[in-house]
Image (cartoon, helix red, strand yellow):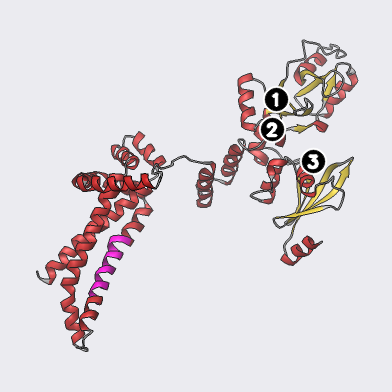
Amino acid sequence: MSLFQNILIIIVLIAGAGFLSLTEIALAGARKVKLKILAESGEDRAQKVLDLQENSADFFAASQIGLNAVAILGGILGEGAFRPYFLNFVNGFYSGPWAETISFTLSFTLVTSLFILFADLMPKRLAMIAPEKIAISVINPIQVFIVVCKPLAWFINSIANVLFKIFKVNTVRDDNITFADISAVMDAGALAGVVQKQEHHFIENVFELEERNVPSSMTTRENVVYFTLKESEESIRQKLAQFPYSKFLVCSENIDDVIGYVDAKDILVRILNNQSLLQLNENTIRNVLTIPDTLTLSELLDRFRSSKEKFAVVINEYALVVGVITLSDIMTTVMGDWVIPIEADQQIIKRDENSWLIEGSTPIEDIKHALEIDEMPDDENYETLAGYMMYSLRKIPRPADFVIYSGFKFEVVDVDHFKIDQLLVTRLIDSSDLLKEESE
């Protein structure tokens, strides 16, 4: 054959190999979520791609048959077509015993470079740009190619399956989507500007409902405002005026003797109707939802939905009340400061770029967000910043006690009757400062 015919055949082989490489990467990289959306919108080819991904063994066997056959044939033709011309070129300045080897090496290098560039590298990079679109475009011709290679592909797959069974290799693809996968997609969307900052914030917090326990968002025991059965009318009026809550616990004598709760609206109606508040009775006291402190916020949402309640008392394993929580508390956890105005008594106060004043009762998840820390050590053992300090120090902290973690110094500022009221958190900028503090 002439040089032109050989070049033409090599171009055809490169094109065939490039098509197979393009198809292989596109079908492997096409995302099921996008394909399902296209299939539901009426794109039949998208469903064919999904079916092929479910049973991809025949395709990959046929693809490898085609790629290897083309590569071998291209090498044979290329070496025979170009070597004589390279030999004439080499003989122009060298006619020694290495002339044949040099011409073969040049011919092999040229053909290999052409296949790597046009049949492998470029098609695969193109396929990664838009895998779903390309997969849909090539699915029909590739199915014909699979049918043509079916007998040989079946034989190769049979051998492969036997080897997989011998070595106990699981060949089932795991397509389960985890929170980490979704979080990575959200991060990429935020970087690209597709997902707004507040939307990214909401989505992350919604997924955290599965991980955060009720104590991380409840009003703690010492901050619960409640009425007793013998509460005076003046005391009830003062609490209603002082605390802007919509619901108040009613207890027999102390907070652990919970009877129910009253809605502030019902009491205000009695006040407006000039009725006495000296006795809270069954007409105003409602049954309260009681939950264990081990529930996650997601599980609590289900409880609220099934019971039609928006208010619950949280108890521990010793049947002691540890706090109360409302549906509004959960929504605040999700929405954060995007919808809740910053108040004077907020738990985290940013003093400057590198220091914060933080209440000891602040949930540890809020600390992670504020300080942009991914993980706290052994965070399954505590719920609040005060709990972290006690767990880390292995004692009841005193003022000036500190812990250093992840480039931050957590220092106790105020302790009231063994309760850690406030801490100063400082970012350690200089690495030498960090080493100095750790040595102390």
Taking the magenta stretch, the answer to whether it contains residue 285 is: no
Which label belongs to residue 345? 3
In the image, the segment drawn in magenta is: 106-120
Which residue position is annotated with label 1?
291
Which residue position is annotated with label 2?
214
Q: Is residue 84 left or right of residue 19?
A: left
Can you name the residue that lies furthest to the left here? 1
Q: Are marks 2 and 1 in contact (CB under 8 Å)?
A: yes
Q: Residues within 10 Å of mark 2 (few under 14, many from 20)?
A: many
Tell me where residue 126 appears, x and y as whole percent: 34, 56
Callout 2 secondary element: helix
Q: Residue 282 or 277: which is nearer the viewer? A: 282
Residue at x 21% of width, y 45% of height: 150
Q: Residues within 10 Å of mark 3 (few under 14, many from 20)?
A: few
Circle 3: residue type: Asp
Q: Residue 433 or 246: which is nearer the viewer? A: 433
Q: Residues within 10 Å of mark 1 (few under 14, many from 20)?
A: some
Tell me where residue 439 appears, x and y as whole percent: 79, 63
**In terms of sequence position, does the residue under pointer 3 or pointer 1 come before the other?**
1
Q: Nearer the viewer, mark 3 or mark 2?
A: 2
Quadrant the C terminus occupies: bottom right
